[in-house]
Amino acid sequence: MTIEFEGRGIVGGFAEGEALVTHETISGWGGIDPMTGTIIESRHELVGVCFTGKILVFPGAKGSSGWSGFFQSTRLLGTAPLAMVFTTVTSKAVLGAIVTRVPTVSEFDLDPLEFIETGDWVAVDGDRGVVTVTKKAERTDLRIAS
């Protein structure tokens, strides 16, 4: 099963890979370890999980403007996600995506957090503002309104 989401391209380019999904916002400063690409925020649902080489799907950024600096460090250290898909546009999330230089899409017609699961195969086209998801397994509870 394949699902396509239309949104707004924030950073151009194309990447595809395995999704890493969180329903919690991510803190940059103190929330991630840029050396390893791991979420270290103690109360986060993905604490200890590495986003390097994954398509990071999340609601958005929280915390200070340090978010962009920490995510830029992941690019410089080679630990960045392949692409970002987020639902809440804030200046820190957008700036973080820009300095990380990975394809990024936001502002969707449907909420991707309701459909994308960790392990799904996701293609992010930042130029077109399109995210295509191939489900890892069939879900019987999935209903998509037309």
Image (spheres, helix red, strand yellow):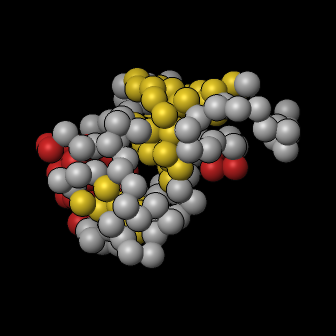
The residue drawn where x is 36% and y is 71% is 41
Residue 87: image location, x then y, percent: 55, 52
**Placement of the C terminus among the 4 image quadrants:** top right
**Can residue 111 be seen from the camera position used here?**
no
Please identify the quarter of the rendering in which residue 100 is found. Answer: top left
Residue 9: image location, x then y, percent: 46, 35
**Placement of the N terminus among the 4 image quadrants:** top right
Residue 27: image location, x then y, percent: 36, 67
Please identify the quarter of the rendering in which residue 141 is found. Answer: top right
Identify whether 69 is placed above or below 122.
below
Residue 93: image location, x then y, percent: 38, 55
Seen as rendered, the residue at the extreme bottom is 43
Horizontal placement of 90 versus 113: left or right? left
Seen as rendered, the residue at the extreme left is 76
**Can residue 115 be seen from the camera position used here?**
yes
The residue drawn where x is 39% and y is 55% is 49
The residue drawn where x is 45% and y is 26% is 16
Identify whether 5 is placed above or below 112.
above
Horizontal placement of 68 versus 43: left or right? left
The residue drawn where x is 76% and y is 32% is 138
Q: How many marks?
A: 0
Horizontal placement of 33 versus 18: left or right? left
Identify whether 45 is placed above or below 95.
below
